[in-house]
Every structure is written in structure tokens, then in C-alpha cells.
Amino acid sequence: MASNYEGYKSPLSTRYASKEMQFLFSDQNKFSTWRRLWVWLAKAESRLGLEISDAQIAEMELQISNIDFEAAAAEERLTRHDVMAHVHVFAKQCPSAAPVIHLGATSCYVGDNTDLIVLRDALKLLLPRVASVIARLSQFAQSYKDQPTLGFTHLQPAQLTTVGKRACLWIQDLIMDERALSRCLEDLRFRGVKGTTGTQASFLQLFNGDGEKVKQLDLLVTELAGFQKAYAVTGQTYSRKVDVEIVAALASLGTTIHKMCSDLRILASRKELEEPFESTQIGSSAMPYKRNPMRSERCCALARHLITLFSSAANTHATQWLERTLDDSANRRLTLSEAFLAADAALLTLLNISQGLVVYPKVIERHISQELPFMSTENIIMAMVKAGGDRQVCHEKIRVLSQEAGAQVKQHGKDNDLVDRVRKDPYFSPILEQLDTILDAKTFTGRASEQVGEFVKEEVEPVLARYSEALKNVQDVKLNI
């Protein structure tokens, strides 16, 4: 007998994604949804006058979740058709209803409509996760809105910002992702009851040419499935442009996660900020002292995979010929599931990170002290001018002292001693009492602190208000691996 460890298993299911997201893309959920769709179709057809009894519908409803997977697999090996295999198995379980199962429908009635239901439910699962990360980072931003830190442009030290203000940059991207995913959910429609090429010809025949009843059938099944609208026109499938839009939003979320976690990895390398690190966690098999940012690295890895999936969805839509071709099938089985599972896994890991971020202010202050003297030179010049000095003379004095201090840093690996050089130069004696104030890091962060408060109130709080109930139940995320 083959071992359970001798076949391929996706890391998304064994290591990363949540049980809830895995269930949405499971065979149990997929095929029980097929059966619900057959029940809804039968109910709607019965309501509109076809000879389908309540007893037949009741018989079908009893078997919705009772799926014989082995029998279905055996049927598919014979028929080479997954939908018909499940029709046959379902019919054997519901003998009185067998004549009306799948009546007038095509395979895409169950296949595509199930995909749309799963996409809807998956978006509903992801959106509160995005909101949870926004909420936690918002708390973090407000806690550290006044903490000065070096800003970086070109990955070189630049004008100061604050730890909280930098976090708002991450949050702003996540708010854009929430908006994009929400729009995908709001725009999502049902394929409905459209027939083999989207013309509804088979249903028109069932209802003896009564087009109004066919329209009502489409509407009834759409409502039973929990959708407000169906797509007005389809081919055999709903347009794969829908997949493109959704995977694009997920891939865009991937860029946000990758950018934020890359920032965290850079800051961790500077020992300014760390992701959670458990007491029993091992950073390296060879270097026991290491505290590697493995969670952020995992997020980046998952995000990169997620980003690449966009091209798969885009190429699938681009190559669908006329009313449809089947070369989308195998691709979509991989792309749609992995996009949501990867997004789910990355968001859960990101939430775990955001719930336990650690800031090291003393390290940040040390780094500021290495760069701030250079950044403060303009302020020193202005103070000297106010004290009666000549601007050009002062500029030359500062230039020479800065070059000398820079040489100490770059050529000799010493600390930045520009401030000491200024203190020792008699020329600057008129402003020595002001020097500590001039060099106060908080005077170099502009309106960063105020911007955090304004941003949270104007941009963050309206988003979180939409998820107030879901956010009440957010618990600390514990990563299994």
C-alpha cells in the first residue's frame, strides 16, 4: 500500500493556507455545490410549470452532501466527462429524480456557476483579513507616530520621518487593495441559466417557446444562489475577463505585501524593527544567534507566486476562442485556487507579523545620530545668521567640518563627530546653547505625526467601520509552521 507521503501535496494546503479557504476549493464543497445547483434548477423549473414534483426535489436535497467520490471517479474514467460522471452517481442516489437532474443544462451551468459562488465566498473570506491587518497596523502607526526614524530614498538616508508615518504608507496600499477586492465582489454576477452557447435555446424548447419563462428561470436560479444579478450575455462560459479582474486584484495585493515585508526585512537587518520571534524559534541551523525574518520572507515568497498568477489568468482570457475552448479548464483549476490560497496564506502570515512587531528606539536613535549632524547643517547656518553671522562664511566653515567628519566615518569607520567639531570651533560659540534644540530629531519630522492622526481618521476609520463586526472576533494568529 502506498504511503501518504509518496504523492504530491500542495504546500498551500499542508503548510500555509487556512482550513476555511481550503474548504472553499475542496472537492466536497465543489461537488455539493453542483448538487445544490441541480436542486435550484429543479425548483425553479417546477415553479414555472415543468413536471417536477416536490418529492423529487426532496430526494435530491437529502443527498446534497452525500457524495460517493470513488463511484464518481470510476464513472469519470469511463465517460471522460466529470459533470456527467457526477450526474450518473447523483441519479443512482436519487432514482425518482434521475429524469430531471441537469434538465436543459450544460456542464458550465454547474461548473461556471460553482466557480462564481466559490469566488464570491473566497472574496468574503479575504476582505476581513485585509481589514484585520489594516486595523492592527493602524494601532501600530498611532503608537509610533512620534518616533523619529531615518527616511530613505534610493535606499540612502534621507530626511527624517516617523515609524508611524512609514506604517501609514503600508496601510494606504492595503486600503487600495481592500477597495479593489470589494469592487470585485460588488461587480461579481452569476452565470445563471444560459445553455450551451449562451442563447438559452434548450430552455426555450423546454418551455415551448415562452421566452418570458426562460428569463424568469434565469432570475429565479440566480436569486436562489444568493446573487442579485446574472451576466446579461455569456458564451458557453462566463467571460474569463472576470477571472482576470479578480486575479489582478489579488496580484496587486501581492505587490503590497511584498513591498511591506521587504521593508520589514531591510529594517530587521538594521535591527530597528523585528517581526515576532518565539522563544523556541531557531533562526539558523549553523548560526544560533540569528533572528531571521522568516515570516516576512514567507510573505514575499507567497506574494511573488501570487503576482505571477496574473499572467496566467490574462493569457487564458486572451486565448478563449469564440463561445469557449476547453484549454481554460486545467489552467483555471490551478490559477484560481492558488491565487486565493496564496493570498489567504500571505494575509494570515502578515496579520501574525503585524500583531507582534517590535521596535527598538535606541537603535533607531543611534542611526539617526550618525546622519542627523549632516542633515542639520542648514539649520545651524540659519541659526548663525540670526546670531549675526555671515551666511557664506558659515557655509564654508560647515562644509570643511562636514568633510572632515565624513572622512572619519568613511575612511576610519568612526562615529560621526561633526557636532563635536562644531562645539569646539569658537566661530559657533554664539549658538552653542541652541545646539541641542537644533539637533532634536523631532524637529526634523515635519508634520509626520499629525499626518498619521489625520490619515487614520479620514482614510482608515471609514474602512474599518465596514468591518466592525468581523473585527470584534479577530484573534491572535498562531502559525503552525
Image: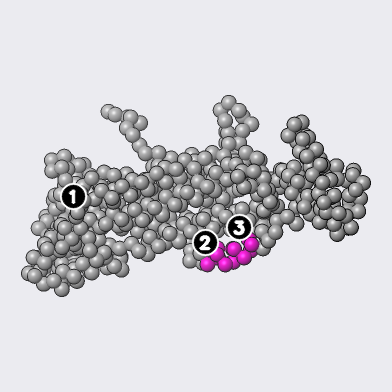
Label 2, secondary structure: give it: helix
* Above or below, 219 relative to 97: below
Mark 3 → mark 1, Cα distance in angstroms: 49 Å
Is 110 or 404 nearer to us in this picture? 404
Magenta residues, start to end: 451-462
Residue 96 among magenta residues: no
Decide: few, some or many residues near mark 1? Use Cα within 10 Å; few <14, some 14-19, many ≥20.
many
User: At which x and y percent is residue 207?
Assistant: 10, 69
What is the secondary structure assignment of the residue under circle 3? Answer: helix
Residue at x 59% of width, y 56% of height: 168
Determine which quarter of the picture holds residue 362: top right
Q: Measure the C-alpha gap from mark 1 to mark 2.
A: 41 Å
Comes first in the chain, label 3 or label 1: 1
Q: Position of residue 427 (x, y in %)?
A: 90, 48
Residue 143 picture quarter: bottom right
Q: Amino acid at mark 2?
A: Lys
- How is this picture coloured? one colour
Determine which residue is flagged by label 2: 472
Q: Is residue 393 above or below residue 405?
A: below
Question: Residue 135: where, in percent of width, then height?
Answer: 55, 58
Residue holding disc 3: 139
Cα distance between the residues tagged 2 and 3: 15 Å
> Residue placed at 85% from the left, 57% from the top?
385
Is 454 inside the magenta-drawn segment?
Answer: yes
> What's the residue type where badge 3 is placed?
Gln
Horizontal side of residue 472 vs 418, given as left or right: left
Quarter of the figure that contains the N terminus = top left
Residue 83: assigned label: 1
Mark 3 surroundings: few (<14), some (14-19) or many (≥20) residues within 10 A: some
